Amino acid sequence: MRFGINSFLFVSPFVTASTKLFSQFKKWGFDTVEIPVEDPSHIDPVAVKAAAKKAGIAVGSICACMGPGRDFRGNAAEQKAGAAYIKALIDQAAVMGCPSVIGPVYSVVGKADAVEPKQQKVEFALVVKNLKALAKHAEKKGVLLCIEPLNRFETDFLNTCDQGLKLVKAVGSKAVKLHLDTFHMNIEEKNQAAAIIKAGKHLAHFHACGSDRGTPGNDHIEWAPIVKALRKIKFKGDVVIESFTTDVKVIARAAAIWRKIEPNRTDIAVKGLKNMHKVFGKK
């Protein structure tokens, strides 16, 4: 099991020059870095791979940024744009030797409204159709698509582990797995550990976030049962700290971070990793 850090904590957008962060992430003790690629043109995957190798850190995952216009349950143009974007991320991941493209790979983030059951079925079918096509490409490239349920304020489409599993099973590809996040589960799940156990072999990626989007382990989440559950299902994926601060204005606005949650963002990374090592029993 590897521990990673999402670069949104320090920069947006991530561009090739942002790889200067890699050496610091490595010094702090992270095994992997998770890169949100807001636009594929922002990075040269060959250069990013070389920078990661030089720093001694792995690019563990690319985080899909499903912004306006990228929506598998939207109109034809939005579906086409979303598919082209994810396909490009899969290609970049393959070049970088990155195993996973993760996140809400189904709809634009922030689209959250009451949808009638009949329309829900239509939208679900559209997402499955788009993901099946992308899954074939991902299989050829040896890359996983890890689907993340978000909380009810960020999407009305996929909120729980049960809903995520339904989607993963409907797509039916070895390249499509589930991605769970403690921040979203803290809002949506009755029991985080039970959700992890239910996900079982389908769980391939995990975000460790504080209950308030701050430092994991410096919050009210019960981490011991979560760790026990991950060990019970023999989880082999990365555990990534994905927390946000007011320092990166674009992400703060998108994630509704209106106040300083921690004294500084370095604490979130350093103390968060220390807390994760403690709860997971890693020295």
Image (spheres, rainbow, N blue to C red):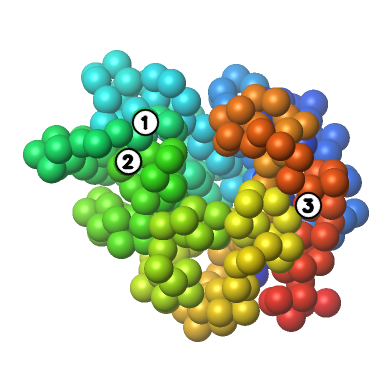
- Mark 2–mark 3 Cα distance, whole angstroms, equals 29 Å
Query: Secondary structure under badge 2?
Result: loop
Q: Which residue is mark 1?
A: 111
Which mark is on residue 119? Answer: none
Q: Which residue is mark 3?
A: 268
Return the disc, 1 or 3, that comes first in the chain's sequence. Answer: 1
Disc 3: CA contacts within 10 A as few (<14), some (14-19) or many (>=20): many
Which mark is on residue 156? Answer: 2
What amino acid type is highlighted by mark number 2? Asp
Q: Is residue 78 above or below residue 179?
A: above
- Callout 1 touching callout 2 (CB < 8 Å): yes
Q: Is residue 3 above or below residue 254?
A: below
Return the disc, 1 or 2, that comes first in the chain's sequence. Answer: 1
Q: In the current view of this chain or complex, which residue is farthest to the front? A: 259
What amino acid type is highlighted by mark number 1? Lys
Q: Position of residue 205 (x, y in %)?
A: 52, 58
Q: Quadrant of residue 191?
A: bottom left
Query: Secondary structure under badge 1?
Result: loop
For the point 52% across and 49% down, the residue is 100
